[in-house]
Amino acid sequence: MHPVRRTVADTTRRLVHRFYEQFWNARQYDLAERLMARDSNFHGTLGSSQGGPQGMVEYARRLTRAFPDLQIRIDELIVERDRAAAHISCTGTHEGELFGCSGTGRRVRYDCVVLFRIAHGRISDVQMYMDRGELRRQLSSVERRSVAPMDA
């Protein structure tokens, strides 16, 4: 029997899955050093950029303060050697401040497209794109009740 050879694409796919399943969903922030390159760049959905594994951890903590039960699902993943594109769905309950809005207790769901670049077996670049206006709308929307007109 021949040993299975892993390709660059296999490594890329495994890294992206570990990034979401273990780092984000399981909150294993100590994995940042093994997943992210020392000089990695991260541009997140909150409009901020972070550098290196510690910057990634700081960003994750900021987002999970706003959504303590945040879970991320990979809906689609396309891998080409050392690059990947993921369509992800994020769900969580808004419990902490975000975009100047205090916790509302509302359950939110938003989608992102995320582009990855891998170098030397670690994530070197992450670019996240989403409709921040849609998330802001979910956080700030107020239930509007229908009011019957008053009789004159």
Image (cartoon, grey):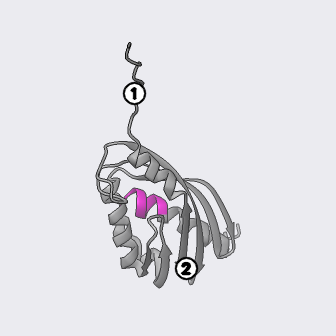
Q: Which residues are magenta?
A: 20-28
Main secondary structure of the magenta stretch: helix
Q: Secondary structure at mark 1?
A: loop
Q: Mark 2 or 1, which is nearer the eye?
A: 1
Q: Secondary structure at mark 2?
A: loop
Q: Please give the name of the residue rendered at 44% of the width and 72% of the height, measured from the top-left corner.
A: 48
Q: Please give the name of the residue rendered at 41% of the width and 64% of the height, measured from the top-left corner.
A: 23
Q: Position of residue 110 (x, y in %)?
A: 50, 51
Query: Three-letter amino acid code at disc 2?
Result: Gly
Where does the C terminus fall, quadrant-wise?
Answer: top left
Marks 2 and 1 in Cβ contact (< 8 Å): no
- Characterize the local packing of mark 2: few (<14), some (14-19) or many (20 or more) Cα atoms within 10 angstroms: some
Give the distance between the C-alpha atoms of the residues marked 2 and 1, in whole angstroms. Answer: 53 Å
Front-lying residue, 15 or 72: 72
Residue 21 in the figure: left or right of residue 100: right
Can I make out residue 6 in this image? no
Query: Three-letter amino acid code at disc 1?
Result: Arg
Residue 125 in the figure: left or right of residue 140: right
Q: Residue furthest top?
A: 151
Front-lying residue, 69 or 134: 134
- Characterize the local packing of mark 1: few (<14), some (14-19) or many (20 or more) Cα atoms within 10 angstroms: few
Front-lying residue, 129 or 138: 138
Looking at marks 2 and 1 on the same chain, the residue that comes earlier in the sequence is marked by: 2
Above-or-below relation of 28 to 135: below
Q: Please give the name of the residue rendered at 35% of the width and 58% of the height, measured from the top-left corner.
A: 98
Residue hosting label 2: 121
Above-or-below relation of 63 to 151: below
